[in-house]
Amino acid sequence: MVLFSDGVLLTSINKKTTMSKKLIKTLVILSIIIIPVLVGIGYFVSVSNREVELKNVFNQKINERTSFYDKMWKVLSQKSQIAVKNDSSFRQNINIIMAARKDADQVFMKWITESNPNANYGEVASLYRDLSRSVEAEREGFFQEEKLIQDVKLQHDNLLNRFPSGIILSILGRKDLVYKPITSDRTDEVMQAGKDNDTKIF
């Protein structure tokens, strides 16, 4: 049973339709405004967190580099001391062996064919080989540590200098990471001159 006349019923339906359209328009407008704002806030937080993460990794790697350098120096120093001490003992033994033979005829040449337990040639050579390998391995390890630090610095620089992350980080007052590579005077001279003519090893 219809309680309203046709005109009243149509007016009521039109009002509901108009209200639905207004509600839809309002929701669409809010979506157009709110979604980009939420995405912007999410990006802002993500960039900030990424910068903090890179800074923390950088500081950790600098500390690791210090520890690695300390370990490298101690390993090479102590291994070289052992090699030098053994070499010195070896020379003393040879001098003692040869001192007894210096005045006798043909005794010096006989020494070549003798078995001398104190003349530990193989051990001395082995110590120097080990020292040489250690120098190379420790230097390579240190180079890899430096390379990791440089990679983190590059990522941080890119984040600071690219758009729009650079704007966000400048608003937050974030600065460049301070990185000073460990080099030698020789390296500095070569980099300044642009030439490396010294090919001498020793």
Image: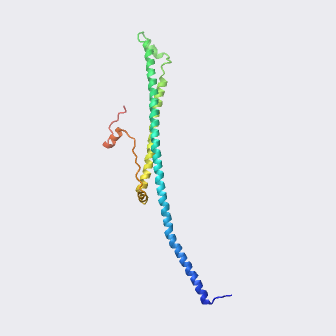
Quarter the C terminus occupies: top left
- Vertical placement of residue 11 versus 27, above or below: below
140 or 197, which is in the foreground? 140
Q: Position of residue 64 (x, y in %)?
A: 47, 42
Tell how many labels.
Answer: 0
Give the x, y percent position of residue 11: 58, 86
As drawn, 20 above or below 165: below
Pick the quarter of the image with the N terminus: bottom right
Q: Nearer the viewer, residue 43 or 117?
A: 43
In the displayed orientation, state which residue is furthest to the right.
1
In the depicted view, which residue is nearer to us: 169 or 188? 169
Q: Is residue 9 visible?
A: yes
Quadrant assignment, res 199: top left
Residue drawn at (42%, 13%), measured in percent from left and top?
A: 99
- Where 12 falls versus 127 (above or below)? below
Image coordinates of residue 28 in percent, x first then y, are 52, 73
Q: Nearer the viewer, residue 24 or 191?
A: 24
Residue at position x 45%, y 28% in the image: 81
Residue at image x 54%, y 78%?
Answer: 21
The structure's colour scheme is: rainbow
Vertical placement of residue 115 versus 192, above or below:
above
Q: Percent from the top left, x then y, of residue 151?
A: 44, 48
The answer, for residue 144, to whether it is visible in the render is no
From this viewpoint, which residue is outermost toward the left? 193
